[in-house]
Image (spheres, rainbow, N blue to C red):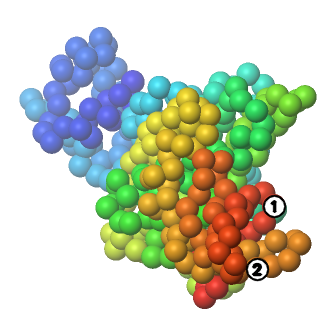
C-alpha cells in the first residue's frame, strides 16, 4: 500500500484526505497513518495537515517504494527486486534465471561493488549517483537473435532520456547511449543456452545520472545526464520510462522476428551514421563510411571501393576516425 499511496500523493497537486485514502484502499485511518509514517522514515517529506490530509512536498527517495509507485508495465519490471548495495545485478538476475523467476523480473541496485562492462571490464558503480539494473528475459526464439536485444535496449534507453529531458540522446553502434558524443550508458547482455534453446537472457544497464568525476582513462568520453542537462533529474522517472519503452520495443521486436519495427527510430538516433569509421576486424583493419543498421542489427559500412559491407558486432568493433564516435 505504501507504493500506491506514494503514487497518489505524487500525482496530486493538493492535499489528499485521510478518508479518501481509507476509502481507496479499504483500510483504517490508523493503517494510512502508519504507511505514511513508514514513508517518512524512508526519507519522504510528507505534510500532514488536520482537516486537509497529506501532501508530498520533498524530492523522491530512490528505492523500492519509489519504483513500485512508478512502474506499471504489463511484464517489464512487474516483479521488482531492489538492493541498496550488491555485487552485480547481472549476477543476481542470472541466479534468478536458474530458478523460476518470471520473464521481465527486474533487479535494481543503488550501488554495485562488482559491476562489469564488455570483455570483463569493470564498470564504476558508486552509490546514489546512477541507475544500475538488469532485466531477465525468457524469449522463445533462436539464440542467434538474442544479440539484437542489446540494440533494442539501447533504443529504449535513448528514447527514455529524450522523453524525460528533451535532450538529443544518440546511439553509438551497437549499444552505447551518448549525450553530446560522450557515453552516458553502457549495456551488457548475457545468455544461458541449452541445446539451442534459450534458457534465459539478462540485459544489464548502467546509466550515469548525477554529475560526477570519472576515472582519468574515460574522462574524455564519458558524461552524465545531469552534467549535460544542467539540472537534477528523477532516477525513478527515468527507469520508469526505460521500462515502458523497452516493453514496447521488445514486444515489437518479438512480433516481427527482427529489428524491422525499430529500424527507422534506431537509425535516426545513430550518431555513427554518415561518419568515417575504422573497422577493427581481426582479418585486417579498414576504413569506411557508416550508414544505418539492417534488420539483423548489423552496421552497414561503405568501403573505399564503394561496396557496402554488413558488420556484425560480435565479430568486430567500430571506432571513429577522429575520436570516440
Q: Position of residue 180 (x, y in %)?
A: 45, 76
* Residue lying at 64% horizontally and 85% vertically, measured from the top left: 321
Quadrant of the frame with the C terminus: bottom right
Q: Position of residue 25 (x, y in %)?
A: 30, 16
* Residue lying at 36% horizontally and 70% vertically, measured from the top left: 229
* Residue lying at 65% horizontally and 24% vertically, measured from the top left: 102
Q: Position of residue 1 (x, y in %)?
A: 39, 24
302 up-or-down from 83: above or below: below
Q: Residue furthest bottom?
A: 322
Q: Can you identify the residue that label 1 sits on?
A: 315
Q: Position of residue 179 (x, y in %)?
A: 46, 71
149 up-or-down from 233: above or below: above
Viewer-proximal residue among 165 and 254: 254
Q: Quadrant of residue 162?
A: bottom left
Q: Quadrant of residue 164?
A: bottom left
Q: Quadrant of residue 220?
A: bottom right
Q: Residues within 10 Å of mark 2 (few under 14, many from 20)?
A: few
Q: Can you identify the residue that label 2 sits on?
A: 286
Which is nearer the N-term, disc 1 or disc 2?
A: 2
User: Is residue 106 visible in this depiction of the protein?
Assistant: no
Viewer-proximal residue among 171 and 179: 171
Helix, strand or loop at label 2? It is strand
Q: What distance separates the C-alpha of mark 1 from that of mark 2?
A: 14 Å
Q: Residue furthest left?
A: 51
Amino acid at each position: 500500500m505504501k507504493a500506491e499511496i506514494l503514487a497518489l500523493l505524487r500525482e496530486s497537486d493538493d492535499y489528499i484526505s485521510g478518508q479518501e485514502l481509507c476509502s481507496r484502499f479499504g483500510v483504517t485511518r490508523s493503517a494510512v497513518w502508519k504507511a505514511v509514517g513508514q514513508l517518512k522514515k524512508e526519507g519522504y517529506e510528507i505534510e500532514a495537515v488536520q482537516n486537509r490530509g497529506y501532501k508530498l512536498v520533498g524530492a523522491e527517495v530512490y528505492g523500492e517504494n519509489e519504483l513500485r509507485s512508478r512502474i506499471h508495465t504489463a511484464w517489464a519490471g512487474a516483479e521488482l527486486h531492489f538492493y541498496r548495495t550488491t555485487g552485480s545485478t547481472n549476477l543476481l538476475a542470472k541466479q534468478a534465471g536458474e530458478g523460476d523467476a518470471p520473464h521481465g523480473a527486474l533487479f535494481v541496485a543503488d550501488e554495485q561493488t562488482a559491476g562489469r562492462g564488455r570483455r570483463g571490464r569493470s564498470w564504476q558503480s558508486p552509490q546514489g549517483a546512477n541507475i544500475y539494473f538488469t532485466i531477465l528475459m525468457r524469449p522463445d526464439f533462436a539464440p542467434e537473435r538474442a544479440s539484437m536485444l542489446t540494440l533494442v535496449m539501447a533504443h529504449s534507453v535513448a528514447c527514455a532520456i529524450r522523453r524525460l529531458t528533451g535532450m538529443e540522446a544518440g546511439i553509438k553502434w551497437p549499444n552505447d547511449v551518448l549525450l553530446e558524443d560522450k557515453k552516458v550508458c553502457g549495456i551488457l547482455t548475457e545468455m544461458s543456452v541449452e541445446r539451442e534453446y534459450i534458457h534465459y537472457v539478462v540485459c544489464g544497464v548502467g546509466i550515469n545520472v548525477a554529475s560526477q568525476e570519472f576515472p582519468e582513462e574515460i574522462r574524455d568520453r564519458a558524461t552524465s545526464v545531469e552534467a549535460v542537462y544542467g539540472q537534477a533529474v528523477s532516477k525513478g522517472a527515468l527507469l520508469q520510462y526505460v521500462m515502458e519503452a523497452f516493453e514496447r520495443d521488445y514486444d515489437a521486436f518479438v512480433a516481427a522476428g527482427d529489428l524491422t519495427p525499430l529500424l527507422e527510430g534506431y537509425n535516426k538516433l545513430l550518431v555513427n551514421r554518415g561518419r568515417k569509421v575504422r573497422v577493427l576486424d581481426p582479418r585486417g583493419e579498414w576504413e569506411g563510411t557508416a550508414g544505418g543498421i539492417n534488420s539483423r542489427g548489423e552496421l552497414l559500412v561503405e568501403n573505399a571501393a564503394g561496396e557496402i559491407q554488413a558488420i556484425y558486432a560480435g565479430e568486430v568493433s567500430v571506432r571513429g576516425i577522429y575520436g570516440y564516435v
